[in-house]
Image (cartoon, rainbow, N blue to C red):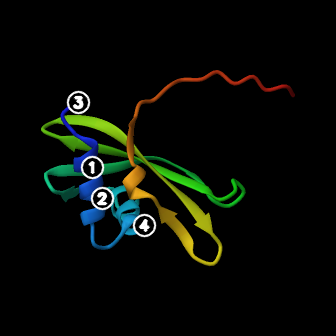
Amino acid sequence: MNITQEEVIAALEAYEEGISELIYTADIKDKPVFINGLSIHTEVDFGGGEGDGEERWVVWGITKDGETSYWKTPGYYMSYNGTNFEVENTHEVKAKEKTVTVWE
């Protein structure tokens, strides 16, 4: 992969408006955000929050030189402070299919 963890963390930390605004711009507005030569073009998945305890996380699609990889930024939610993402713990992830059995 041509994108390093250090590059991704530096790009996320460099976004002055913060992670929540980056999520809004990259996903809801569907506009890529270009930071330090990386295109953060989509929020692939987002989890946690209300009903799921304190854990929150976001998975980003990030492109460099035409090659896309996926990165997960963990975080936590506190009712008095909102969501805090731990950008320094961002790491590369890959989709993995799982089978779930449900009894109804």
Q: Residues within 10 Å of mark 3 (few under 14, many from 20)?
A: few
The image quarter in which residue 17 lies:
bottom left
Q: Is residue 45 left or right of residue 61?
A: right
Marks 4 and 2, the one that precedes in the sequence: 2
Q: Position of residue 76 (x, y in %)?
A: 57, 60
Q: How far, Cα to Cα, is label 2 from label 3?
A: 18 Å
Q: How far, Cα to Cα, is label 4 from label 2?
A: 11 Å
| Residue 31 seen in the figure | no
Q: Secondary structure at mark 2?
A: helix
Amino acid at circle 1: Val
> Which of the numbered marks, if any, corresponds to residue 1?
3
Q: How far, Cα to Cα, is label 1 from label 3?
A: 12 Å
> Which of the numbered marks, if any, corresponds to residue 102?
none
Check the image and report above or below for 58 versus 67.
Answer: below
Q: Which residue is mark 4?
A: 20
Q: Position of residue 50 (x, y in %)?
A: 68, 61
Quarter of the figure that contains the C terminus: top right
Q: Residues within 10 Å of mark 4 (few under 14, many from 20)?
A: few
Cβ atoms at labels 1 and 3 below 8 Å apart: no
Cβ atoms at labels 2 and 1 below 8 Å apart: yes
Rendered residue at 65%/73% (across/down)? 79
Q: How far, Cα to Cα, is label 2 from label 1?
A: 6 Å
Check the image and report above or below for 68 versus 101.
Answer: below
Cβ atoms at labels 2 and 3 below 8 Å apart: no
Q: Nearer the viewer, mark 4 or mark 3?
A: 3
Q: Which residue is mark 2?
A: 12
